[in-house]
């Protein structure tokens, strides 16, 4: 017995039908008689012909569902991204379902595996992949968002986070701030924003102060800003790596008895629903995550229709824009 | 041709095999030869033999996944609920996947149908069902949360929202407030909280002022509070139907040039992550949605193991508690 993986040709030979008939069965074409369909499925079973896509198709019809992996439902950056995904899936009648990286942590399985177990047609990976994220060859997967770790061979659609970091820093510099603190955390988008912020601060002759470690969460933004204001009371502006961290930064400024933006300006990044909340009215960078989601899902739909060859993976960047609201102002004279 | 639904006996007759062999195929018993399996599947196909559970089993093994339907990812009430669901699923090695009622609106399908199409083993319905939500008989589904519309025959696990509404109102009354506004919106939890709030205000001899219409969203909380403060400037306290509406209420108080809680106290409901945010520090009611999720998922696991008979559906209530933070205080003397 050969160790070579069986192909569609082997299945056709075993079933005594043409290769194109096997293809018709695999794509669930209704024009195949039940008897011939059964013969093809039996041959596929006997040969253990189960590459990923075929397994889903053999198991019945395709699910016509796209899975989306998000990292943490507490950070609503994914909300506009999902809107974009939906926009792209709508014309194709594709459903979407979600898994988050926390949801199944107890099982020790990856959310990608969890979705593939549901036989989704493809996955938008909008979360930081772990080092051991393995994407089965031929499985349609597109990464949405800038990630520290991208499983090899995958296309990436992301906002240009370095450009976003520059936009935020330039905004503070252009208002006249020279004592700027950047509050950051873990993960790919934060790393790109941090590098850009430091580079721009150095270029402007401003000492690059960076605070914060751990998750890019509100508590990290709070604690980083609190420490920065103690150690550098001359601080007049904080660039937080994302909107929830900016909420923490604003709270830390207030708890220090100072006002935003009169004493300390705060800018975030993500243009989440929180940023436009009338309680926050946050100046932020819009990474256009709706556009990221839309382009990632469109790419995924293409891959579902025609799996990619061996070419280099594609990388698509979306240009961010600045959204000025009420949390930034010139420093006190 | 009969209009009677085909049974396992019809499939066996059509395939020329025994009923027990059909059963073996349906439960994916590996002891069936590929050829006989194919014959059974072909017969099932020809007869369109696809009752719900059987369809899942025909398609392969069960997915070992539970689906959760949530209403709107913008309102993070579901975050603790999901934690509870995960806690209950962990010992059973069950995965979870999510769908929201908005995600597939473009397809005109219900999120419940979307999840069932993925052949999940069961569903926690943590969203308002539409009037036409149809649960296929024998499908394990449990409703989590108080709902205006519950598909017939389903078990419900919910926080005691009436008790929550009373807790919030009593808290404001006990602080000495007599000019209380309730800001509300659509949906089952809001209706229960509203009825309880009005009842307690009337019992306390306070005129029950109710504002707000439409979604229980931040904008509704903002606009309802804004109008209330214009039409009833004597208002000293606002009970918002949930935490995001309370965020809108706080913003409306501030935009009216007033302070929370010195001029106007604000209490929410849900104990979302926003409530404990250092930027908000919201007094609220904790419905213990983690416990709601845990109990609902435990009930679901039971149903997956042994589908319920014809008995009356069960209703389980979780007692809420009050969480006092910084947005409520006695009225100015």
Image: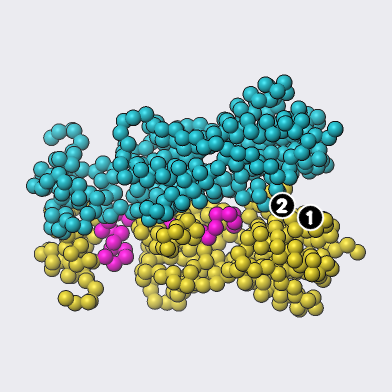
Chain colours: A cyan, B yellow
Q: Is residue B155 above or below residue A61?
A: below
Specify the subunit that label 1 lies on: B
Q: How far across and how far down the image is residue B222, in percent?
A: 70, 60
Horizontally, residue B282 falls left or right of residue A30, namely right
Residue placed most toward the observer, B131 or A90: A90
Say which mark, if any, is on residue B254: 1
Along the horizontal axis of the image, is A163 left or right of B32? Answer: right
The alpha-carbon separation of the residues under discs 1 and 2 comes to: 8 Å
Q: How many marks?
A: 2
Residue A209 visible in the snapshot: yes
**Contact, mark 1 vs mark 2 (Cβ under 8 Å):** yes
Instruction: Say if A112 sits above or below B44 in the image.
Output: above
- Asked if residue B68 lies in the magenta stretch, the reply is yes
The furthest residue to the right: B333
Question: Is residue B214 located in the magenta-colored stretch of the structure?
Answer: no
For disc 2, the chain is: A
Q: Nearer the viewer, residue B204 or A97?
A: A97
Q: Residues within 10 Å of mark 1 (few under 14, many from 20)?
A: some
User: Which corner quadrant holds the N terminus of chain B?
Assistant: bottom left
Q: Residue at image x 50%, y 35%? A: A317
Q: Which residue is tagged 2? A: A279
Please name whichever residue, A78 or B169, is drawn nearer the observer in this view of the structure.
A78
Magenta residues, start to end:
B50-77
- Res B23 quadrant in image: bottom left
* Image quadrant containing the C terminus of chain B: bottom right
Of residue A301 and residue B246, the one placed in the foreground of this image is A301
Place of residue A115 in the rendered image (x, y in percent of width and height, measured from the top left): 39, 48
x, y (%) of residue B140? Answer: 40, 65
């Amino acid at each position: 017995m050969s160790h070579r993986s069986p192909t569609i040709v082997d299945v056709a030979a075993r079933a005594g039908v043409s290769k194109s008939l096997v293809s018709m069965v695999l794509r669930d074409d209704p024009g195949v008689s039940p008897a011939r369909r059964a013969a093809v499925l039996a041959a596929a079973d006997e040969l253990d012909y189960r590459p990923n896509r075929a397994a889903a198709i053999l198991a019945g019809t395709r699910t016509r569902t796209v899975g989306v992996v998000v990292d943490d439902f507490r950070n609503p950056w994914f909300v506009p991204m999902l809107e974009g995904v939906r926009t792209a899936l709508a014309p194709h009648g594709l459903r979407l379902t979600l898994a988050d990286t926390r949801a199944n942590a107890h099982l020790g399985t990856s959310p990608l595996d969890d979705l593939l177990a549901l036989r989704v047609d493809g996955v938008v990976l909008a979360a930081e992949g772990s080092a051991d994220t393995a994407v089965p060859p031929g499985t349609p997967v597109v990464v949405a968002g800038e990630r520290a770790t991208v499983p090899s061979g995958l296309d990436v659609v992301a906002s240009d986070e370095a450009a976003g970091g520059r936009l935020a820093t330039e905004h503070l510099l252009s208002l006249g701030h020279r004592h700027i603190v950047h509050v950051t955390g873990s993960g790919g988008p934060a790393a790109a924003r941090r590098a850009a912020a430091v580079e721009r601060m150095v270029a402007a002759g401003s000492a690059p102060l960076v605070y914060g470690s751990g998750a890019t969460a509100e508590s990290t933004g709070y604690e980083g800003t609190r420490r920065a204001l103690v150690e550098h009371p001359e601080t007049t502006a904080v660039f937080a790596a994302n909107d929830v961290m900016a909420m923490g930064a604003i709270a830390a400024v207030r708890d220090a008895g100072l006002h935003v933006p009169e004493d300390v300006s705060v800018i975030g990044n993500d243009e989440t629903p929180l940023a436009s909340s009338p309680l926050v009215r946050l100046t932020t960078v819009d990474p256009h995550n709706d556009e990221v989601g839309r382009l990632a899902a469109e790419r995924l739909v293409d891959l579902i229709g025609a799996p990619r060859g061996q070419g280099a993976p594609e990388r698509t960047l979306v240009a961010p824009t600045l959204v000025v609201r009420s949390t930034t102002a010139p420093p006190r004279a």
